Amino acid sequence: MTDARDSTPEDRVRSDSLDRLRGNRNRPDRARDLGGAIAIGQGIARRARAVGAVAHAWETCVPEDLRRQSELISFAGGIVKVGVANGAARYKMDRWLRGGGETALRREAKAPVTRVRLVTK
């Protein structure tokens, strides 16, 4: 049996190295606070309200014939992405948006709508 006093400098270096590895392997318990989770939940709720406001504005502002040929795909970063059925529907939607529809949508949405992007489905 070897004694700690009989160990060589190389043995001590190896032992210190193993102790450092063990320290890295065993992670300390992190403090469990609810602040981060609450902030995430509030962000999700705020985003859901914005999406709901845009969807409501879409239903109230867009004419029925255009709504039947289109659908809301997403709302992120102030950009409303709208899918349209075909090129003719895209043209009609573009004319409506440029003719004041986009302004009406922004006014009604109560969310920061900066742009409406049309994509053909």
Image: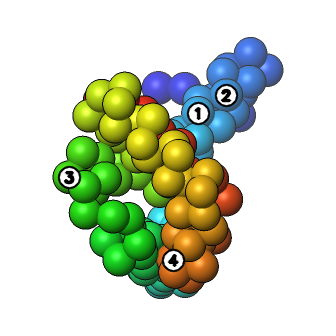
| Distance from Cα at disc 3 to Cα at disc 1 | 63 Å
Closest to the camera, between mark 2 and mark 4, is 4
What's the residue type where badge 1 is placed? Answer: Leu
Q: Is residue 68 visible?
A: yes
Q: CA distance from mark 4 to mark 1?
A: 56 Å
Determine whether label 1 and label 2 are within 8 Å by CB.
yes
* Residue linked to disc 3: 68
Secondary structure under badge 3? Answer: helix
Q: CA distance from mark 3 to mark 4?
A: 20 Å
**Residue at the location (53% across, 63% down)?**
101
Instruction: Please tell me whether residue 38 is drawn above or below residue 15 in the rendered image.
Output: below
Q: At x 44% / y 46%, what residue is drawn? A: 93
Point out the frontmost of discs 3 and 4. Answer: 3
**What distance separates the C-alpha of mark 2 from that of mark 4?**
61 Å
Q: CA distance from mark 1 to mark 2?
A: 6 Å
Q: Which of marks 1 and 4 precedes in the sequence? A: 1
Q: Residues within 10 Å of mark 4 (few under 14, many from 20)?
A: many
* Residue 18: image location, x then y, percent: 59, 30
Q: Is residue 21 above or below residue 114?
A: above
The 10 Å Cα crowd at callout 2, few under 14, some 14 to 19, many 20 or more, is few
Which SS class for mark 4? helix
**Label ID, residue 21:** 1
Residue 119 image-quadrant placement: top left
For badge 4, the amino acid type reads Ala
- Residue drawn at (42%, 42%), measured in percent from left and top? 92
Identify the disc placed on residue 17. 2
